[in-house]
Amino acid sequence: MLVETGVSGAELRSEASRIAAQVEAVFSGYLVGTGDGRDRLFEAMRHAGLGGGKRLRPLLTVATGRLFGLAEDRIVRAGAAIEAIHVYSLIHDDLPCMDDDDLRRGKPTVHRAFDESTAVLAGDCFHDLAFEIIADPATHEDPFVRAELVLEMARASGPRGMAGGQMLDLVAEGQALDIGSITRLQQLKTGALIEFAVEAACIMGRLPPEARTPYRGYAHDIGLAFQIADDLLDHAGDEATAGKRLRKDERAGKATFVSLLGEDRARRQCAMLVSQAIEHLHDHGTEADLLRAVAQYVEERDR
Amino acid sequence: MLVETGVSGAELRSEASRIAAQVEAVFSGYLVGTGDGRDRLFEAMRHAGLGGGKRLRPLLTVATGRLFGLAEDRIVRAGAAIEAIHVYSLIHDDLPCMDDDDLRRGKPTVHRAFDESTAVLAGDCFHDLAFEIIADPATHEDPFVRAELVLEMARASGPRGMAGGQMLDLVAEGQALDIGSITRLQQLKTGALIEFAVEAACIMGRLPPEARTPYRGYAHDIGLAFQIADDLLDHAGDEATAGKRLRKDERAGKATFVSLLGEDRARRQCAMLVSQAIEHLHDHGTEADLLRAVAQYVEERDR
């Protein structure tokens, strides 16, 4: 489906790379070595955190911040903090005891390029880095806002959010999940952090909770659409373009949206969610164009 | 050596268990299951976080808070957050790819009682929990204080603090460390978080940085004394009392304060540091008695 968003695909790609570069600049500032044995740790963190990734979460934070006229250098820092949580989770999820992946963002995973113990530590350090970035006065002038961002990020990341979703995924191995269970699992595993990426901008824009409803709706729909698109990509995509191993779930007999719905219905469901996400933004004019374009990208992405 | 501290050994033990119980009560409040597959994660977190441990860090935070008349229910929450960082680090340090330990606090380690992937996640979730506890308004009424606590805790825990020390420890394997290198390593690996346990109370007491010098001196000395005592315990202690495997460093040929200084000099160095730590408190009267008693306990502990 096509909605006129006012931001072309080329413009979106250009905005996305500009924001990705700013996120990497934030990371780089924190990842300067110490000239001792810890340099191996900083090197592993740079390997994991620089030079790759879609940076969807910071893009969502910046695009939502645009609705409220937030200064980009500040909102980018919040986006970078959320991306740091995402990077930490990828490093740990790739570990041999978890998904045992050897390829991520077109490069060897951290435990393959370094070793397992360095990967555990590098993940732990990105986890700290996320909180160090978001709690810094440079992210928001109001300490009340910073403390709320910390609290909500910890909740989105922890056992009732992303990590809880990963646990559900681990215990689901070998079980026949239905569509409700897989939706719930994915809402936690990937949805919680995507929802926080949008929520963070609402917090920084000082929106009272009751005014956040449309943006939560957008984030909820986008989170689910993103995961369905991920399953479609896993099913039909190209490993070289994706930069990671594909069809692992299929080989392991794990339930996905594609295995449960079939490719056609999954594609239609994804398109419906994207259109529904854009609908949540109907009160906005051109200032929401980037957010609308991001929604469309989720449906059309090839990596 | 013996200093009259005004708090007897029995009184210290009673205070320590009272504070430990409060810390566990804070943890328990967060570790209620969700009635789905995530319950395994909550169970692993309860296994790691409840029913054991010296709780030295919260004890230090509460004892320092007493100098500034801080409300105990609030300062205990900051202590619990720091203990959550400690618990997360123990779970990950015990992993097969790290120290590969099977016993901790007298119980099987998390990856032995559950499995490796659950242990990685349980550690990650204690890491989040630390930030969730400390950023909560219940910990301090002033959001500026909460944001500063978050920032400093992330720094104490990350690559320039505790995790950096663990990295130094990993790269030091098989290398002949001198006393300067081992001191630096331990100042990061265990010292950084012990120093933050004291600093957190200073932040909550709104001490300007220049007024924190004596408490930083105390924390620095105690941190080092604690590690020397740990090496002494590892060398001469009893596994059943300690609740963990001992003499692993010795068998692996790793340098410790005891292997470098010998038992007698290590014992004298520990006593000197404890006496020096207490000296930093000379401007204080009886309100510092608990902090003085904690210093003495560090020297005399048997687990």
Image (tube, coloured by chain):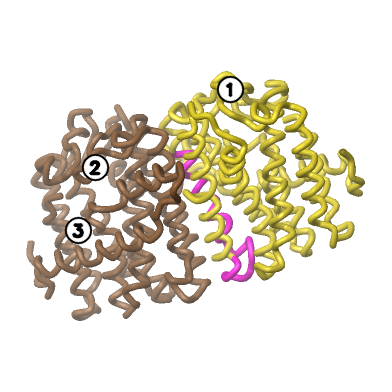
Chain colours: A brown, B yellow
Q: Position of residue B74 (x, y in %)?
A: 68, 59
Badge 2 or badge 3: first in the primary sequence: 2
Q: Which residues are magenta?
A: B121-145
Does the CB distance between marks 2 and 1 fall below 8 Å? no
Query: Can you tell which of label 2 and label 1 is closer to the viewer?
Result: 1
Can residue A188 be found in the magenta stretch?
A: no
Q: Secondary structure at mark 3?
A: helix
Chain letter for mark 1: B
Residue name at image x 55 percent, y 28 percent: B109
Q: Is residue B192 left or right of residue B205?
A: left
Q: Position of residue A19 (x, y in %)?
A: 25, 66
Q: Is residue A160 visible?
A: no
Label 1 packing within 10 angstroms: few (<14), some (14-19), many (20+): few
Q: Secondary structure at mark 1?
A: helix
Measured in 3D between alpha carbons, the distance from the residue under mark 2 to the one under mark 1, in whole angstroms, is: 35 Å
Residue name at image x 58 percent, y 61 percent: B149
Residue ID for mark 2: A104
The lab-note entry on whether marks 2 and 3 share a chain reads: yes
Which amino acid type is marked by label 1?
A: Lys
Q: Quadrant of the C terminus of chain B?
A: top right
Q: Which mark is residue A273?
A: 3
Residue ID for mark 1: B248
